[in-house]
């Protein structure tokens, strides 16, 4: 349901400059293309099932059967950014596949092209403007083509996207994902551009602005999910923390928690489809709070309730906010065996002056106290962090404090980012982006090297130990080799979220396996699966087929 009118603009001649950005090719942001989304659901039977359903439930116009439709039905989608974006793409792809679209990994093949975008750093936006620029000429040859920009950059840049890339047909913000199928259809039919975005944070009351950011969480069919055993479930969206460097409160709107009854129904539905691991998503996921039927639900209550779901093996959640790491949550993690003992709780910086300029709402002393409580309740847990280097006014001395923090907390891993000034943020108006790029790069490298050393040392402590792994499926190497032998390199994660690779039968995907670790890298444990010899009838442990 849209709460705002969709603005349509007549398509103009494609004569403007189009795109100005250049792609740096850096790996700072994850990208997910049609291949990734299609990966697990790629069996022919899966897509056939989707099409069969389309033909029984939709009108001939909606079915878009090849002979009837005015486009080739091929969809190319590229996703940049966080897990929230991956989930949005998955849901939009599912909606379009229901209408008869099929994914292609080649933009040249597609009459429908979508970019799900990220605005957290400038470089992520450059990538998208560059990709749009590359499509400009091909678009002239394909009058039936529809190009859409969705997500954070759509909400942030709005009609500026049409100015910079006039061949774009639809611009759809994070709060209007449900509109995409209809907008594509209209754009192709009427050749009018459409802009569907939410209200700016100051353009109405909190209630009005919140209502203009609609959560998009329809139930998913199993064949529409990228992995049969893992799923993301959004429990909240938006953010009210307003860290001075961050655009998310603008691009995702006010903090809103979804109703527990809806979340629990979604988890039960996924369990019924064979999902074994659910990752709960929220920008500050541990700030979750919702009153339903007079009861206040926090994240700990949600975890306790979903823990009862038959079939589920593991629950995780990202990303946490340090000030909201309450004892009830840590007690829930301690007492609920299906909860992963992994907490991603970004410190962002090791220096109090910088944290204060970032308006993070805590000091290093607060973070230390929180970390001590995590380790008291969950001694074997893994904690990970994000860091920003080169924030406005960061001295060499304050940078050293971030290095000290990595030494002190021995994070499992850290995501390290060079500060990128973002329009519309408080940092942009209050401070000067005064750290030269080469200094940012060097500081980034120093944090990364130290973190890698620590990760490798801490991983090495696992050598010779047995770990319980939730098997995810073939590793990236195995997929690349496409080896048809019975044993393949599999990948999975320990309870504290360490990645483990080992050889095994792909049938183990979605189950728990015991693996002995014999080698490590900073990011991965390498092991072999434990086979147990059991005498029939003498033990509940069955031999594992490897
Ligand atoms: N520049 C660099 N990094 C940023 N992040 C958020 N905003 C910016 C910015 N303007 C980082 C933070 C956050 C992660 C998702 O991205 O570390 O935790
Ligand atoms: Fe951005 Fe801060 Fe909100 Fe995280 S908590 S999304 S960094 S404003």
Image (tube, rainbow, N blue to C red):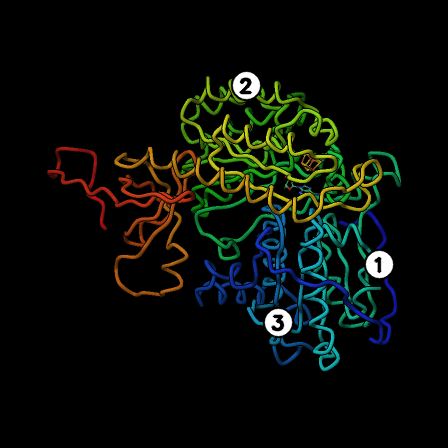
Horizontally, is 456 left or right of 488 in the view? right
Which x, y percent locates residue 439?
Answer: 65, 44
Q: Which mark is in front, 2 or 1?
A: 1
Q: Which mark is residue 119?
A: none
Mark-to-mark CA distance, 3 and 1: 23 Å
Mark 1 lies on a secondary structure that is loop
| Residue 157 in view, yes or no | yes
* Nearer to me, 367 or 73: 367
Check disc 1 and report the residue beneath it.
Answer: 159
Q: Residues within 10 Å of mark 1 (few under 14, many from 20)?
A: many
Q: Are marks 3 and 1 in contact (CB under 8 Å)?
A: no
Q: Quadrant of residue 398?
A: top right
Sequence-wise, the earlier of marks 3 and 1 is: 3
Tell me the residue at 32%/35% (across/down): 462
Q: Quadrant of ligand 2?
A: top right
Sequence-wise, the earlier of marks 3 and 2 is: 3
Q: Which mark is in front, 3 or 2?
A: 3
Check disc 2 and report the residue beneath it.
Answer: 328
Which x, y percent locates residue 102?
Answer: 57, 68
Residue lying at the far left of the rendered structure: 535
Q: Quadrant of residue 500?
A: top left
* Nearer to me, 364 or 143: 364
* Placement of 372 over or under 160, stated as above or below: above
Mark-to-mark CA distance, 2 and 1: 45 Å
Which x, y percent locates residue 379?
Answer: 42, 22
Check disc 3 and report the residue beneath it.
Answer: 107
Horizontally, is 99 left or right of 411 in the view? right
């Amino acid at each position: 349901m849209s709460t705002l009118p969709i603005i349509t603009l007549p398509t103009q001649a494609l004569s403007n400059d189009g795109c100005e950005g250049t792609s740096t090719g850096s790996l700072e942001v994850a990208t997910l293309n049609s291949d990734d989304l299609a990966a697990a659901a790629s069996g022919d039977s899966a897509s056939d099932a989707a099409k069969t359903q389309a033909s029984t439930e939709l009108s001939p116009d909606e079915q878009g059967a090849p002979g009837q439709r005015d486009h080739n039905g091929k969809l190319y989608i590229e996703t940049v950014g966080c897990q929230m974006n991956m989930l949005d793409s998955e849901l939009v792809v599912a909606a379009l596949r229901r209408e008869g679209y099929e994914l292609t990994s080649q933009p040249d093949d597609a009459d429908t092209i979508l970019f799900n975008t990220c605005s957290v750093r400038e470089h992520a936006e450059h990538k998208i403007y560059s990709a749009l620029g590359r499509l400009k000429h091909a678009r002239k040859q394909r009058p039936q083509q529809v190009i859409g920009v969705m997500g954070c950059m759509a909400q942030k840049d709005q009609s500026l996207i049409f100015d910079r890339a006039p061949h774009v047909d639809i611009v759809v913000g994070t709060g209007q994902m449900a509109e995409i199928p209809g907008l594509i259809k209209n754009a192709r039919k009427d050749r009018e551009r459409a802009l569907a975005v939410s209200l700016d944070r100051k353009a109405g009351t909190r209630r009005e602005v919140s209502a203009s950011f609609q959560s998009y969480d329809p139930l998913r069919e199993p064949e529409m999910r990228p992995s049969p055993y893992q799923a993301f479930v959004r429990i909240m969206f938006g953010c009210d923390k307003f860290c001075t460097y961050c655009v998310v409160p603008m691009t995702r709107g006010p903090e809103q928690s979804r109703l527990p009854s809806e979340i629990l129904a979604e988890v039960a539905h996924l369990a019924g489809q064979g999902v074994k691991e659910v990752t709960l998503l929220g920008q500050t996921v541990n700030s979750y709070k919702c009153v339903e039927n007079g009861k206040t639900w926090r994240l700990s209550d949600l975890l306790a309730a979903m823990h009862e779901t038959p079939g589920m093996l593991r629950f995780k959640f990202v990303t946490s906010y340090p000030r909201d790491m309450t004892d009830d949550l840590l007690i829930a993690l301690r007492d609920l065996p299906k909860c992963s003992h992994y907490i991603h709780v970004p410190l962002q910086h090791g220096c109090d002056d910088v944290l204060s300029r970032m308006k993070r709402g805590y000091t290093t002393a607060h973070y230390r106290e929180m970390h001590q409580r995590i380790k008291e309740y969950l001694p074997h847990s893994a904690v990970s962090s994000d860091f920003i280097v080169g924030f406005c006014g960061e001295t060499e001395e304050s940078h050293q404090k971030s290095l000290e923090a990595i030494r002190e907390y021995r994070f499992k891993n850290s995501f390290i980012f060079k500060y990128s000034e973002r329009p519309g943020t408080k940092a942009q108006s209050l401070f000067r982006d005064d750290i030269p790029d080469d200094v940012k790069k060097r500081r980034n490298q120093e944090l990364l090297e130290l973190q890698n050393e620590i990760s490798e040392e801490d991983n090495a402590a696992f050598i010779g130990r047995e770990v319980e792994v939730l098997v995810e499926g073939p590793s990236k190497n195995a997929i690349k080799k496409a080896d048809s032998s019975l044993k393949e390199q599999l990948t999975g994660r320990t309870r504290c979220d360490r990645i483990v690779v080992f050889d095994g039968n792909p049938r183990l995907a979605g189950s728990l396996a015991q693996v002995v670790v014999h080698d490590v890298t900073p990011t991965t444990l390498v092991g072999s699966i434990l086979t147990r010899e059991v005498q029939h009838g003498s033990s509940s442990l069955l031999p594992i087929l490897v």
